[in-house]
Image: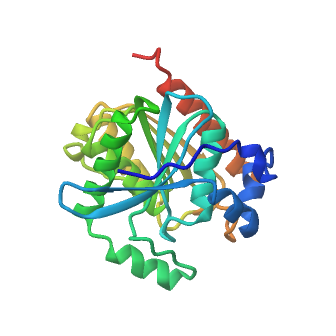
């Protein structure tokens, strides 16, 4: 189903130990780190061939995190986050919802986003989640995590198939208790007070719906703008990005341990 290279020690890249923000902000370093990942492919029940980037920790089996990219597509920055999660002991799978296309301008990103067929994206994500659950390198415990475009799809994936934890970075969230009825995982949401897209009205409607559906969630607000966690963008806020990442790691640790449940 996939080709797996011999797992190399990540120290061999010469960038081991660098802060994640440093890796993400430098295209050359991010490219070097991204090249450590294996490309894996599978065929969905609908017959489509889809791909993802896989990073394995040194010790397995381990809990897994499925990462969903921003509207730029599956670029080196998202692969670098997957690599960092593998360094921290997780199986990390960064999925591709845009057929290998990567945008470099907002217009290109907008066009890619508009080309995504929701039913196909849902099938892609649920197929990869099922793949991770049965993979020999995982414990079967799975979290989804996404940013912006991917943040919305993180919770959509968790509504479509049961997972153990869901993380949303400033992504579009649903406001229907009925739609959220199938959600089984706790959700961690990172949102920005200056965000003109994913604003307080949307997030409050979502939390009201989560309360009505009796679902578990934690929301953190940051005095920042949309995409504050992306070091390559103009809205990057290092302090808030670091705080959000720390909270993300705590959330993963709390909900992916084998002992829980």
10 versus 224 height, above or below: above
225 versus 219 height, above or below: below
Residue 234 falls in image quadrant: bottom right
Q: Which of 111 and 120 is in front in this view?
A: 120
Residue 171 locus on image (x, y percent):
45, 57
For this view, does 112 lie left or right of residue 76? left
17 versus 103 height, above or below: above
Residue at image position (20%, 62%) is 47
| Residue that extends furthest to the bottom in the rendered view of this protein | 107
Q: How many marks?
A: 0
Q: Can residue 236 be seen in this view?
A: no
For this view, does 117 lie left or right of residue 51? left
Q: Which of 192 and 49 is in front in this view?
A: 49
For this view, does 160 lie left or right of residue 249? left
Q: Which of 200 and 12 is in front in this view?
A: 12
Q: Which of 190 and 252 is in front in this view?
A: 252
Residue 260 locus on image (x, y percent):
45, 17
Residue 102 locus on image (x, y percent):
51, 74
Quadrant, the C terminus: top left
22 versus 10 height, above or below: below
Residue at image position (74%, 54%) is 21
Image color mode? rainbow
Residue at image position (30%, 51%) is 175
Residue at image position (37%, 55%) is 153
Q: Can residue 257 be seen in this view?
A: yes
Residue 37 locus on image (x, y percent):
58, 53
């Amino acid at each position: 189903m996939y080709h797996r290279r011999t797992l190399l020690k990540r120290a061999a890249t010469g960038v081991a130990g660098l802060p994640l923000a440093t890796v993400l902000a430098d295209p050359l370093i991010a490219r070097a780190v991204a090249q450590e990942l294996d490309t894996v492919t599978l065929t969905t029940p609908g017959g489509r061939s889809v791909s993802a980037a896989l990073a394995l920790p040194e010790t397995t089996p381990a809990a897994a995190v499925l990462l969903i990219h921003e509207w730029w597509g599956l670029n080196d920055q998202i692969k670098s986050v997957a690599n960092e999660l593998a360094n921290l002991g997780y199986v990390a799978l960064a999925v591709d919802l845009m057929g290998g296309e990567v945008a470099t301008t907002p217009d290109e990103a907008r066009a890619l986003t508009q080309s995504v067929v929701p039913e196909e994206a849902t099938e892609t994500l649920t197929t990869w989640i099922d793949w991770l659950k049965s993979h020999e390198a995982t414990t079967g415990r799975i979290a989804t995590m996404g940013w912006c475009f991917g943040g919305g799809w993180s919770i959509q994936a968790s509504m479509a198939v049961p997972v153990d934890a869901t993380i949303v970075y400033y992504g579009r969230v649903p406001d229907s208790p009925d739609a959220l009825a199938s959600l089984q995982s706790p959700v961690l949401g990172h949102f920005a007070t200056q965000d003109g897209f994913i604003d307080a009205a949307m997030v409050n409607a979502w939390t009201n719906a989560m309360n009505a559906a009796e679902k578990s969630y934690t929301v953190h607000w940051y005095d920042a703008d949309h995409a504050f966690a992306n070091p390559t963008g103009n809205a990057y806020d290092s302090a808030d990005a670091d705080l959000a990442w720390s909270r993300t790691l705590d959330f993963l640790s709390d909900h992916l341990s084998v002992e829980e449940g």
